[in-house]
Amino acid sequence: EVQLVESGGGLVQPGGSLRLSCAASGFIFTSSWMTWVRQAPGKGLEWVANIKEDGSEKFYVDSVKGRFTISRDNAKNSLYLQMNSLRAEDTAVYYCARDLRFFNYWGQGTLVTVSS
Amino acid sequence: QSALTQPRSVSGSPGQSVTISCTGTSSDVGGFNYVSWYQQHPGKAPKLMIYDVTMRPSGVPDRFSGSKSGNTASLTISGLQAEDEADYYCCSYAGSFTLVFGGGTKLTVL
């Protein structure tokens, strides 16, 4: 059974940093693109970033470029999102999802709140 | 990276059919056959309903179907059931390994 479990969310002040993690199991992690998608409270879904199977290529939505870094540790079957210079508009539930073009598997999400 | 355009809400009675549109540009919806649709119930993670414009994952009822014409993709739900009431999001590949979602449509089953 495919499982994706996010962690690391919480309350952080504007300008602060947070690192999200996603533990993957039930599939061959090293053969899968991985993606972060977020959803602000009461708003729609937004694609944030993705990373190639071997971590060699990474892509971001314009609004997080230079502030967020996606990474993975294939030895630990884990996906990460390092978020720096956080802004109020980054407040959202962050989901990790498997694959590149469409997402058949999602985690339960972790809430990030950016507020003073 | 502008969001795809969806109607804010649609509604239908049980047994009826509804169609949700998703309009983009030639750089996303119109340029690739990589449109997917997600159903999201309150407080839950999204669920994949359609991928690659018309394909249905295993376990999704055949009441759900997808299509595309030009820069507009559509999700049609036939034989509406109460449990179909949810938010629906389209998503398209936008080139250069990036994706874009629609703003979401709230489906109400009357």
Image (tube, coloured by chain):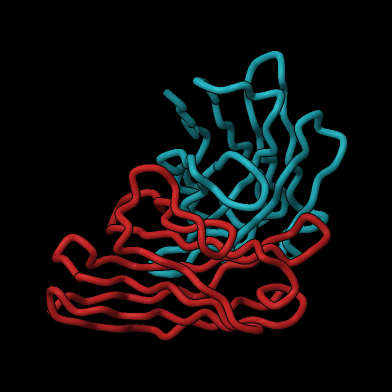
Chain colours: A cyan, B red
Task: Left or right? Give the position of B46 relative to B84.
Answer: right
Q: Is residue B49 above or below residue A88?
A: above
Task: Left or right? Give the position of A69 relative to A35.
Answer: right
Q: Is residue B22 above or below residue B54?
A: below
Instruction: Give the percent coordinates (x, y) of residue A1.
Output: 42, 23
Q: Residue at x 70, y 27 (%)?
A: A31
Viewer-nearest residue: B106 or B50: B50
Q: Residue at x 20, y 70 (%)?
A: B79
* Residue B86: quadrant of the picture: bottom left
Q: Residue at x 72, y 29 (%)?
A: A72
* Residue B28: quadrant of the picture: bottom right
Viewer-nearest residue: B79 or B22: B79
Residue, far top = A75
Q: Which image quarter holds the N terminus of chain B?
A: bottom right
Instruction: Give the percent coordinates (x, y) of residue B74.
Output: 48, 77
Q: Residue at x 64, y 31 (%)?
A: A79
Viewer-nearest residue: B101 or B80: B80
